[in-house]
């Protein structure tokens, strides 16, 4: 399912992309058209295929077959330079015993030229890095440990850390890792807001309320349970976020 005009400019165009692993097919072959700007939600079943697809779109993995164009770039190395990736297990996980101030300081040092001395992050740094992602939500305390943050705040913090350079494409893990329905709605709204200045892509296995402001909702049939993908039009909205 798509809900954007056929004439819309595309940020991602994939034709027949597929990935294989030691134990067989991971995903694909898939065709995808993700519009430029706004938030696009891919409805896909959780698992290594969904993760690998996001890594491919963000230039962290090369498809084994097919053609992929992301913002005019076709090689994984070139795509990597215009895409940020956040909220993906084993790629940007943070230790629960680490404090927010340490994460911010580390990211600032990583982003800075090697010759620049970066001191410990301050409240001003917290505001600069996190406010665009958190919006009107309260920012986490600098002295808080990651394990003390809610699921929503923890994921928003990971997005903020990944998005310091505001690259044209932002790929965000999956919204299902936030278990509260209310918090998921807030998360989708925040990602949609980021989509006013970037192309944002995330995933879920659930239905999404159109009122939350996403640009496109795309079913990935080969990554959806049969009973989910073939749900008849007009079915009840049980499970809708």
Image (cartoon, helix red, strand yellow):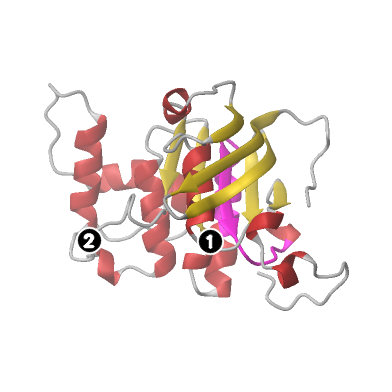
Which residue does the image show at 68% across and 58% down from the upper left? 212
Magenta segment includes 189 = yes
Q: Please give the residue where the numbered disc 1 appears in the rendered image.
A: 175
Label 1 sits on a secondary structure element that is: helix
Residue 26 image offset from top left, x and y in percent = 52, 52
Mark 2 crowdedness (10 Å alpha carbons): few <14, some 14-19, many ≥20 = few
Residue 115 at least partly seen: yes
Q: Is residue 115 above or below residue 36?
A: above
Crowding around mark 1 (Cα neighbors within 10 Å: few <14, some 14 to 19, many 20+) is: many
In depth, the one of 65 and 155 nearer the eye is 65
Specify whether residue 91 is painted magenta: no
Q: Position of residue 154 (x, y in %)?
A: 37, 61
The disc label shown at residue 125, or none? none
Q: Nearer the viewer, residue 154 or 120?
A: 154
- Dot 1 or dot 2: first in sequence order is 2
- Measured from the top left, where is residue 153 in percent x and y? 40, 62
Between 181 and 30, the residue placed more toward the observer is 30
Q: Which residues are magenta?
A: 188-209
Apparent side of residue 46 relative to residue 23 in the rendered image (left or right): right
Residue shown at 58% from the left, 25% from the top: 71
Residue 162, image x, y percentages:
37, 43
Disc 2 secondary structure class: loop
- Residue at the spot of label 2: 95
Q: Which residue is found at the position 80% from the left and 67% from the top?
A: 230
């Amino acid at each position: 399912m798509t809900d954007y005009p056929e004439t819309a400019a595309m940020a991602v165009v994939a034709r027949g992309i597929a990935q294989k692993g030691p134990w067989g097919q991971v995903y694909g072959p898939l065709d995808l058209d993700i519009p430029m700007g706004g938030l696009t939600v891919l409805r896909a079943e959780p698992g290594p295929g969904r993760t690998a697809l996001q890594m491919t779109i963000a230039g962290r993995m090369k498809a084994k077959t097919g053609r992929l164009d992301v913002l005019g770039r076709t090689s994984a190395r070139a795509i990597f330079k215009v895409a940020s990736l956040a909220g993906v297990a084993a790629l940007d996980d943070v230790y629960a015993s680490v404090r927010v101030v340490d994460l911010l300081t580390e990211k600032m040092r990583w982003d800075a030229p090697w010759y620049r001395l970066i001191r410990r992050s301050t409240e001003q740094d917290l505001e600069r890095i996190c406010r665009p992602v958190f919006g009107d939500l309260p920012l986490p305390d600098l002295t808080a440990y990651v394990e003390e943050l809610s699921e929503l705040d923890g994921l928003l913090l990971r997005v903020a850390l990944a998005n310091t350079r505001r690259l044209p494409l932002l790929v965000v893990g999956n919204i299902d890792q936030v278990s509260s329905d209310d918090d998921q709605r807030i998360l989708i709204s925040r990602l949609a807001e980021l989509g006013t200045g970037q192309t944002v892509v995330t995933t879920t296995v659930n239905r999404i309320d159109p009122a939350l402001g996403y640009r496109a909702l795309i079913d990935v049939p080969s990554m959806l349970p049969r009973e989910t993908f073939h749900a008849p039009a007009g079915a009840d909205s049980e499970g809708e976020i």
